[in-house]
């Protein structure tokens, strides 16, 4: 019998609250505490499913000591289990999940992933193109420092890439890709799983035209094939 404390890394909906697994709900209902990237966002999810648990903040900009203090609750025997949630989707991309997992493992805590919603896999599902040659996931691109050197490295990359972008930088990012991949094919998922979900695909020129023509809002996931 395994009596080690457990830290569950829980994937949560990226928009539609119905997109949560039964396993995730069971863990949230039976855990001692919820560790959240944004307590306000997680509170809405928990309230929707009638789950009442103590919620502790662990933001990306939190000091390293915050994650350690949370892990110390396991060591002190205060928690047998806890669930870590990001604002949306699968933890470990642009959140403090990696730091928390590393500290937990070093402390001898069992770390268990509870897979589920992900914008990365969602856009791949509707791309309609063969991705068996490989996909490079970039998360959010650098806004300034390191951006130019990144695109220089991407110039000769043979794989399709997936990345996240906001409305203010969508056209710029597409234009930057056009420079290195002139004939790129693009699939854009806007507000995936939400009420105003929209999928747009076409050449990089066609998608840039669409983006400029429309007053686009929301969050974007891009899949770009050279």
Image (cartoon, rainbow, N blue to C red):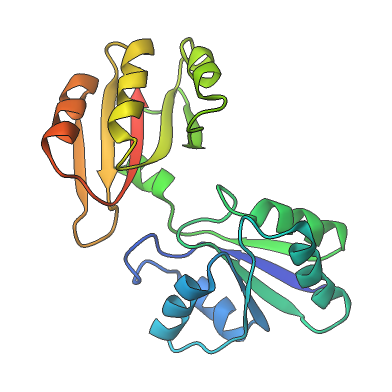
190 w.r.t. 16: above or below: above
Residue 129 in sight from this viewpoint? no
In the picture, the quarter occupied by the C terminus is top left
Where is residue 9 drawn, in percent x and y? 62, 63
Left or right of 168, for residue 99: right
In the picture, the quarter occupied by the N terminus is bottom right
Q: Residue at x 29, y 53 (%)?
A: 192
Where is residue 128 drawn, in percent x and y? 26, 34
Where is residue 185 drawn, in percent x and y? 27, 22
Left or right of 122, for residue 140: right
113 w.r.t. 76: above or below: above
Q: Residue at x 36, y 28 (%)?
A: 173
Residue 103 in sight from this viewpoint? yes
Left or right of 132, for residue 84: right
**Which of the 4 image quarters holds residue 100?**
bottom right
Left or right of 205, for residue 80: right
Where is residue 113 drawn, in percent x and y? 62, 60
Front-most of residues 114 and 182: 182
């Amino acid at each position: 019998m395994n009596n080690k404390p457990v830290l569950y890394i829980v994937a949560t909906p990226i928009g539609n609250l119905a997109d949560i697994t039964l396993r995730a709900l069971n863990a949230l209902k039976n855990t001692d505490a919820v560790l959240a990237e944004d307590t306000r966002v997680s509170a809405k999810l928990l309230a929707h499913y009638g789950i009442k648990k103590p919620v502790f903040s662990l933001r990306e900009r939190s000091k390293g000591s915050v994650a350690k203090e949370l892990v110390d609750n396991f060591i002190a025997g205060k928690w047998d289990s806890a669930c870590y949630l990001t604002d949306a989707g699968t933890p470990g991309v642009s959140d403090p999940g990696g730091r928390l997992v590393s500290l937990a493992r070093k402390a001898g805590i069992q770390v268990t992933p509870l897979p589920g919603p992900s914008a990365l896999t969602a856009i791949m599902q509707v791309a309609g193109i063969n991705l068996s040659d490989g996909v490079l996931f970039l998360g959010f691109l650098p806004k300034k420092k390191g951006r130019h050197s990144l695109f220089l490295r991407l110039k000769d990359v043979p794989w399709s890439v997936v990345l996240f972008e906001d409305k203010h930088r969508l056209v710029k990012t597409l234009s930057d890709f056009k420079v290195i991949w002139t004939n790129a094919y693009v699939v854009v998922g806007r507000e995936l799983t939400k009420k105003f979900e929209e999928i747009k695909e076409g050449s990089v020129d066609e998608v840039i035209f669409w983006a400029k023509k429309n007053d686009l809002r929301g969050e974007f996931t891009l899949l770009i094939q050279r």
